[in-house]
Amino acid sequence: MRKIKTYTDSASLTGAAVDEFIRLAQNAISMGGRFNVALSGGTTPKELYGLLANRDYQTELDWFSIHLFWGDERCVPPEHKDSNYHMVDEVLLSHIIIPDANVHRMLGEIDPNEAAAKYIRQLENHFQHTGASMPVFDLVLLGMGVDGHTASLFPGDRSLNETHQWVLAVEHNQPPQPLVTRLTLTLPLLNAARNVIFLVSGESKADTVKRILVEGERLPAGLVEPRGGCLVWMLDEAAGNGLN
Ligand code: 6PG
């Protein structure tokens, strides 16, 4: 099931995304005792994390029952400016009290293939008692690039054809994105999630949003269709301009 929600501007988009995050977290924790969420890099998701750090929400979020994973990571040290972990640490983790054991960082500083294997084992360990054949995130947050990439799944890349591995190391060589090796969750794992939310804002994304949501172009972000879960595209008016 896919929903498209459009908001006046990125601030109201982010505010609505916080409410949805809190709702899903509270539901998951009351149903199963914990909330497993995969975070995205990107400027729009970053605004959400910054708002989540706001003191006003601390009474509504039980961080001791929330487990943070990453949907992708650049293969750089955690303190590097291009690290998605570094971004989340700066705007969220350094402002909240969350157990270290609840923060499941991808190890961008080690050999990429070894880091992918380690993350798969970390996922296996964390989700092993769920009885499901693969990890089922309560929520996957995603951004989308102008080229239609999401996480670190880029157009034309072999990673889009992966049907078994949950995490891959990928080479990305298309500026303006930083030219680094990356780690990414794959489509089988993203599509196993209970809820996937795309956070997309800005006029630069409008054409790509239209190509995916109106014309059905099979760009990477358009391949995220959770099998049994809910898919919500949360857009500001600028990014959703081509949908009218
Ligand atoms: C990354 C992100 C990537 C991001 C998009 C959108 O590591 O680069 O995970 O998938 O979400 O590039 O980023 P913006 O919202 O900044 O355009």
Image (spheres, helix red, strand yellow):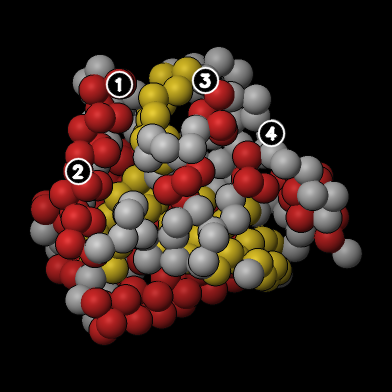
Would you name the residue on which mark 2 appears? 122
Structural distance between the alpha carbons of marks 3 and 4: 13 Å
Mark 2 or mark 3, which is nearer the start of the sequence? Answer: 2
Depth check: give the residue in front, 76 or 168.
168
Q: In the figure, residue 8 lies in which quadrant?
A: bottom right
Q: Residues within 10 Å of mark 4 (few under 14, many from 20)?
A: some
Is the Cβ of the residue at disc 4 closer than 8 Å to that at disc 2? Answer: no
- Amino acid on which the number 2 mark rests in the picture: Gln
Structural distance between the alpha carbons of marks 2 and 1: 14 Å
Residue found at x 42% / y 37%: 164
Give x and y (percent) for residue 229.
51, 67
Mark 4 or mark 3, which is nearer the start of the sequence? Answer: 4
Q: Which of the two marks, 4 or 1, is nearer to us in this view?
A: 1
Q: Is residue 149 among what the camera can see?
A: yes
Would you name the residue on which mark 3 appears? 172
Residue found at x 56% / y 41%: 150
Structural distance between the alpha carbons of marks 4 and 1: 25 Å
Is the Cβ of the residue at disc 4 closer than 8 Å to that at disc 1? Answer: no
Q: Which mark is residue 147?
A: 4
Would you name the residue on which mark 1 appears? 113
Q: Which of the two marks, 3 or 2, is nearer to us in this view?
A: 2
Tally the numbered discs.
4
Is the Cβ of the residue at disc 3 closer than 8 Å to that at disc 4? Answer: no
- Find numbered disc 1 in the image and state the secondary structure of the residue it sits on: helix
Q: Is residue 222 above or below residue 35?
A: above
Mark 3 or mark 1, which is nearer the start of the sequence? Answer: 1
Instruction: Name the quadrant of the N terminus.
Output: bottom right
Give x and y (percent) for residue 169.
39, 24
- Amino acid on which the number 3 mark rests in the picture: His
